[in-house]
Image: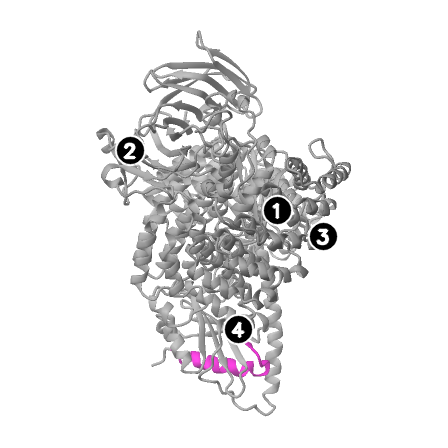
């Protein structure tokens, strides 16, 4: 226990100096006495020491006295002493040596409790140069006749591993653990061995192939079945551990899946939510490739999840609701008749209500929208302003996803009549979005919006929305030029640069439509804009000024081009990220709504993070044989994933300018933290990629130059190349991108790609091997590798195929950079033959 | 991945460490301070209350609030959130089992015992056991029981007032290990049927949504761990399948008690449940839920609330609140509080209580513009009225009902259960004619979210 930092003295927390030396003296007096009755005195003193330790007073100076006093048969005293020693040994290794003696002696005590406790303390010292004293007691602990001692010893091995890897491995403790795991009659010993082995092999797997094999072995049919058969012997917590391991297992046939589900069916009725969620994760994972059964699983888990939501503390409800939220957003139709369960209760905390509002938005469909929106309107009048705002946003989201928005628009406009500033503000932002999607409603909306006094709108987002509408619908709003003029004249009072930018644009738009009335406003706005200290505002004003100088007709075309309604507002999260979160069901990823790589460093992602992917690859392919036949691995690398989402973003810029601009717009003003973070990350990857493409261009130039020099011998590939997934991952991380380009797959290629297997087999005939594939149509992702025939240098390829555009994004990495272009052309020619008769 | 926690600590409301246990040593110093500052000054996306789980610099912080204390776990791993939150709740329960009563003082007095428990509950971040039963053989400290006399002053409803959703144990406040002074341990078993009801009424009094969340809670002080059989009434059935749960009418007249869903404690055997509605179990020591259930079938509302608002000119209005108890006159509800948010421009409220009102109090909270009416007791079948005259600081515009309400209500009704689920008998299998332990079966209904719109 690293003591928390010292705090300033307060009545409840004495600073300690004098007290500690006092304690030291008293302990010393008692240390020598072994007479009966002194234990009570010692207990009191020990208690004081521990209490000082808890509140952060450094009591390490009484270490030797504590050790001296520990020669006792009183187990309560011993325990306090162990606690103390465990806390200070790490920072006082010399003193820790003092304790070895009595701890080793206690490890041989006849009382198994004392043996266990001493062994636990011994392993908890966390002092590297004392590990030699650990091996003996640990070895006998693992063989102890008492299960408590074995329980302690199995965790002790893990502790030793963290202090000294080599000592732990040299003593061959993992093998002993494995033996215990498969044979010990005590279920908690088995569970501890399993946890320890998972942790050890996952950490070792990157260093040795044997460890990687051992880790895989934990997922072998034999071990999985052994654990499942004993599932009821484990306590509820160990059951969670086992279920988590089992969810990584890939069954060979569907009968296995049904057997496992039958066996575990009653775990869904467990009062412990952790067991239920672990079971649900397993069921979802098992049935991923069986659409019908997967849907039945959703139906089956609904009731238990809802029961957990309402039977636990608000904190537990939150954790369960977050998972329910994920399921609801994935399959809204399954939950559409359960919408009343997502109504908010007045006493729920905000974080729960927020999730429920999201779920109501997700399940809204033709049949329930009226009721859901009515309920949301009640919340909009709520005294709790945050909830009122969120509810209005929810109504807006529903409006944007529905075909029949008639009733909703009326409701929104009623909000404006409530004359509550926060309600008005939220509603204005929504009405603006609504008009961008449904311009046909402009007449109704503008009539109401026109009545709002801009003085009552202070929030920048809302003000910007109102100003946008004034500019956009200047011809319909009688007062538009005068309101704008008023705003322009009070330029200095407007602190938000965003509002000033919008004001400039709105005045320009208004001017184009009603020049004489707006002239004054325009003059004021341009003058103020040119003098603005904010760079963007200044630049925009200058731009408009020059534009007008240049040609008014052209200005009109720039400022007021014909507009198309936005059909779909861009989703804030890519499907790939959503899938990744789903794969990490029953983890923090679901709570944070981010995949683990965004908030956790690699070593903490989980012992099976890699094999986790093995299990997941069937997503999207929906065919069971895809799982079994090829060893499929989807790389878990941050870079891999980011590069994909970043590409999606780039694509969306190209294909749909309006969607992109909307995202940028939203991102700049609001942006939930996660979103803006995401943007930031992908943004700097984009720039990185630009750099890469730049250097690529230079490469190309060089390549061009080289074509005059004698061509090197043609590249030959090894048809029987092999590479294991972990080395692939490692290489992928280490090597720079040698080639990155977009190639065409051709209609025939896309058509032939009915299952990923087709392409995998085709490429194999060209000595290019697939190591992993995944994704969901229209985006399929493959990782290939190939090896040079003469030496064993490798080529690694990431290939993302978009079936609808018939384009593929290629990234090639190579051990031997000089031949990467040659390889790339082999790859492309192989690809181009795919699907040809 | 399997859940590993790095640290566990309990903080007081002021942020003091009451206990602090580091299991893995992989979290930098000062995590308790970082956590407390974050929770205290939380403000994000309009949220003013920190969610139970958040991440600061790669460290995940989990917390649950129990009797005003913060039970916290930290980890770097991407663990199962339910696992850790459930664990925190369970650690609190185990400590309560040992101390008899859980509060800051009891924790401070018993922190050595608490450390002893923590060492056995979690080892190197991995949970070993949270069973009070199992822990008994590893624990050697005796609990120091806090002054029980003071606890009585909390009143009969006092125990239910902690926390706002899930009430903590209701059985008794005695430790599972401490011996009664001067006498031998009393053989007894407590079974509490606790129902939290949620209801939302429309402005016309129509029931919009209703739900009962029930728990059968058990606390056993029986020696020798005999098997216990708990029989529920025959009308109970558990609904399955995709039937719409808001399907009112139909079944409700027949006396059937249809639970939407339920779950059970690990120790419960359901072998004969389908035949005779019997749960059999060997109750472990300590307090635990035998069964949690959820019901959305229509049930009789225990209270009807009527709100009338009359505008009297542009600067005044009168609110008339009527509440009627719809249960039998042999039953009393207690600790009733009725609240109603008033328009923000309300400057003064004067109350007029019914003649001869006893045990009633009224309040207008200026800080949040909220009217509060509390009643110590309501007898079944009776009706109570409150008149409140509001004065506004600015002229009314628009509809006053959009500016006020809804009316919400909290209450406790002992010996009443809304679902009609009952424990028919409680059988203790022990081979002795003279053995006749005390059996307590108690019902209690409590408002969870009871709201009438205006």
Q: Which residue is mark 1?
A: A498
Q: Nearer the viewer, residue A529 or A168?
A: A168
SS for dot 1:
helix
| Visible residue check, residue B299 | yes
x%, y% of residue A304?
36, 44
Tell me the chain of label 2: B
Mark 1–mark 4 distance (CA, rounded to whole Å): 50 Å
Mark 3–mark 1 distance (CA, rounded to whole Å): 63 Å
Q: Which residue is mark 3?
A: A95
Q: Are marks 3 and 4 on the same chain?
A: yes
Report whether B335 appears left or right of B206.
Answer: right
In what quadrant of the picture does the C terminus of chain B appear? top left
Q: Nearer the viewer, residue A703 or B73?
A: B73
Residue farthest front in this picture: A35
SS for dot 4:
helix
x%, y% of residue A608?
48, 61
Tell me the chain of label 1: A
Mark 3–mark 4 distance (CA, rounded to whole Å): 44 Å
| Visible residue check, residue A247 | no
Tell me the chain of label 3: A
Mark 2–mark 3 distance (CA, rounded to whole Å): 62 Å
Q: Which residue is mark 2?
A: B232
x%, y% of residue B58?
60, 53
Q: Nearer the viewer, residue A406 or B377?
A: B377
Mark in front: 4 vs 2: 2
Residue at x 41%, y 27% (from the top left corner) = B446
Q: Which residue is mark 4?
A: A727
């Amino acid at each position: 226990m690293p003591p928390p930092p010292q705090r300033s003295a307060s009545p409840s927390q004495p600073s300690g100096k004098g007290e500690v030396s006092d304690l030291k003296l008293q302990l010393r007096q008692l240390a020598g006495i072994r007479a009966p009755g002194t234990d009570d005195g010692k207990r009191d003193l020990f208690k004081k020491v521990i209490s000082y330790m808890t509140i952060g007073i450094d009591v390490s100076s009484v270490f030797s006295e504590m050790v001296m006093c520990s020669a006792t048969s009183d187990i309560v005293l011993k325990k306090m002493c162990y606690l103390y020693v465990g806390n200070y040994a790490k920072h006082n290794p010399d003193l820790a040596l003092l304790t070895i003696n009595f701890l080793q002696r206690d490890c041989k005590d006849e009382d198994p409790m004392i043996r266990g406790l001493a062994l636990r303390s011994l392993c908890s010292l966390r002092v590297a140069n004392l590990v030699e004293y650990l091996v003996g007691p640990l070895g006998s602990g693992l063989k102890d006749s008492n299960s408590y001692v074995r329980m302690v010893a199995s965790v002790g091995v893990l502790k030793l591993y963290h202090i000294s890897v080599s000592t732990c491995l040299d003593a061959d403790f993992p093998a002993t653990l494995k033996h215990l795991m498969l044979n010990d009659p005590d279920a908690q010993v088995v569970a501890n061995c399993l946890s320890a082995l998972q942790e050890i092999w996952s950490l070792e797997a990157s260093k040795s192939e044997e460890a990687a094999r051992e880790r895989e072995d934990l997922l072998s049919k034999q071990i999985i079945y052994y654990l499942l058969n004993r599932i009821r012997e484990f306590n509820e917590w160990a059951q969670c551990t086992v279920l988590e391991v089992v969810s990584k297992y890939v069954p060979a046939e569907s009968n296995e899946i049904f057997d496992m589900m039958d066996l575990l069916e009653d775990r869904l009725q467990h009062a412990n939510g952790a067991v239920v969620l672990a079971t649900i994760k397993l069921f979802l994972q098992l049935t991923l490739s069986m659409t019908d059964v997967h849907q039945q699983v959703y139906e089956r888990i609904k009731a238990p999840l809802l029961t957990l939501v309402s039977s636990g503390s608000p904190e537990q409800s939150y954790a369960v609701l977050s998972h329910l939220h994920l399921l609801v957003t994935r399959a809204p139709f399954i939950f559409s008749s359960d919408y009343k369960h997502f109504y908010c209760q007045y006493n729920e905390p905000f974080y729960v209500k927020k999730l429920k509002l999201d779920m109501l938005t997700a399940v809204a469909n033709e049949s329930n929208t009226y009721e859901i929106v009515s309920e949301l309107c009640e919340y909009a009048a709520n005294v709790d302003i945050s909830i009122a705002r969120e509810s209005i946003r929810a109504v807006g989201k529903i409006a944007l996803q529905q075909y029949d928005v008639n009733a909703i628009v009326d409701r929104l406009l009623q909000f404006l009549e409530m004359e509550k500033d926060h309600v008005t503000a939220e509603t204005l932002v929504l009405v603006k979005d609504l008009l961008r999607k449904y311009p046909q409603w402009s007449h109704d909306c503008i009539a109401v919006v026109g009545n709002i006094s801009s003085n009552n709108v202070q929030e920048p987002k809302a003000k910007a929305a109102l100003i946008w509408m004034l500019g956009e619908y200047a011809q319909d709003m009688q007062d538009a030029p005068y309101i704008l003029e008023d705003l322009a004249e009070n330029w200095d009072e407007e602190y938000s640069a965003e509002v000033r930018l919008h004001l400039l644009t709105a005045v320009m738009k208004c001017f184009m439509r009603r020049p004489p009335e707006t002239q004054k406003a325009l003059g004021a706005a341009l003058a103020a804009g040119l003098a603005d200290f904010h760079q963007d505002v200044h630049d925009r004003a200058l731009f408009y000024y020059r534009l007008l100088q240049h040609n008014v007709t052209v200005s009109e075309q720039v400022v007021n081009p014909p507009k198309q309604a936005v059909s779909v507002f861009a989703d804030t999260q890519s499907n790939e990220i959503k899938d990744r979160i789903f794969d990490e069901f029953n983890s923090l990823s679901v709570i944070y709504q981010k995949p683990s790589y965004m908030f956790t460093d690699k070593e903490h992602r989980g012992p099976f993070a890699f094999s986790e992917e093995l299990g997941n690859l069937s997503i999207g392919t929906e065919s069971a044989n895809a799982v079994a036949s090829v060893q499929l691995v989807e790389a878990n690398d941050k870079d891999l994933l980011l590069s994909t989402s970043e590409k999606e973003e780039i694509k969306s810029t190209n294909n749909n300018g309006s969607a992109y601009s909307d995202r940028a717009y939203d991102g700049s003003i609001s942006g939930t933290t996660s979103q803006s973070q995401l943007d930031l990350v992908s943004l700097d990857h984009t720039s990185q990629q630009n750099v890469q493409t730049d250097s690529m261009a230079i490469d190309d130039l060089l390549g061009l130059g080289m074509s005059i020099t004698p061509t090197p011998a043609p590249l030959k590939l090894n048809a029987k190349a092999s590479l294991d997934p972990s080395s692939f991952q490692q290489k992928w991380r280490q090597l720079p991108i040698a080639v990155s380009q977009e190639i065409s797959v051709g209609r025939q290629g896309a058509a032939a790609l009915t299952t990923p297997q087709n392409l995998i087999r085709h490429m194999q005939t060209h000595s290019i091997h697939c190591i992993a594939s995944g994704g969901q149509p229209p985006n399929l992702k493959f990782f290939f590798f190939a090896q040079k025939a003469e030496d064993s240098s490798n080529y690694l390829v990431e290939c993302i195929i978009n079936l609808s555009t018939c384009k593929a994004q290629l990234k090639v990495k190579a051990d031997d950079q000089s031949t990467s272009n040659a390889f790339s052309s082999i790859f492309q020619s192989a690809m181009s033959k795919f699907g040809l008769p | 991945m399997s859940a590993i926690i790095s640290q566990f600590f309990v903080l007081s409301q002021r942020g003091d460490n009451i206990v602090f246990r580091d299991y893995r040593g992989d979290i930098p110093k000062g995590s308790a301070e970082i956590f407390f500052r974050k929770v205290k000054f939380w403000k994000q996306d309009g949220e003013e209350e920190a969610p139970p789980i958040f991440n600061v610099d790669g460290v995940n912080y989990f917390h649950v609030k129990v009797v005003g204390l913060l039970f916290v776990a930290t980890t770097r791993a991407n663990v199962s959130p339910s696992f850790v939150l459930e664990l925190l709740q369970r650690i609190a329960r185990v400590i309560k089992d040992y101390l008899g009563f859980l509060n800051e003082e009891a924790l401070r007095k018993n922190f050595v015992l608490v450390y002893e428990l923590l060492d056995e509950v979690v080892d190197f971040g991995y949970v070993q056991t949270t069973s009070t039963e199992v822990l008994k053989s590893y624990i050697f400290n005796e609990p120091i029981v806090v002054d029980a006399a003071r606890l009585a002053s909390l009143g009969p409803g006092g125990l239910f007032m902690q926390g706002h959703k899930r009430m903590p144990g209701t059985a008794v406040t005695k430790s599972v290990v401490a011996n009664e002074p001067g006498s031998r341990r009393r053989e007894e078993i407590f079974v509490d049927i606790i129902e939290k009801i949620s209801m939302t009424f429309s402005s016309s009094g129509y029931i919009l949504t209703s739900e009962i969340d029930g728990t059968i809670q058990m606390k056993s002080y029986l020696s020798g761990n005999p098997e216990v059989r708990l029989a529920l009434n025959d009308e109970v059935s558990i609904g399955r399948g995709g039937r719409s749960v808001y399907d009112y009418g139909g079944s409700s007249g027949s006396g059937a008690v249809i639970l939407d869903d339920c779950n059970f404690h690990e120790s419960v055997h359901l072998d004969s449940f389908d035949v005779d509605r019997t749960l059999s179990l060997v109750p472990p020591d300590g307090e635990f839920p035998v069964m949690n259930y959820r019901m959305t079938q229509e049930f009789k509302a225990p209270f009807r609330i009527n709100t009338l608002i009359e505008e009297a000119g542009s600067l005044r209005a009168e609110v008339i609140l009527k509440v009627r108890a719809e249960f039998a006159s042999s039953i009393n509800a207690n600790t009733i509080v009725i609240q109603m948010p008033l328009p923000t421009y309300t400057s003064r409220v004067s109350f007029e209580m019914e003649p001869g009102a006893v045990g009633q109090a009224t309040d207008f909270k200026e800080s949040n513009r909220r009217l509060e009416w509390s009643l110590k007791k309501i007898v079944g079948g009776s009706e109570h009225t409150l008149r409140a005259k509001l004065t506004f600081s600015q002229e009314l515009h628009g509809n006053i009902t959009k500016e006020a309400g809804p009316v919400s209500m909290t209450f406790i009704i002992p010996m009443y259960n809304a679902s009609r689920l009952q424990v028919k008998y409680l059988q203790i299998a022990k081979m002795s004619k003279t053995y006749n332990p005390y059996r307590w079966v108690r019902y209690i209904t409590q408002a969870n979210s009871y709201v009438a719109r205006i």
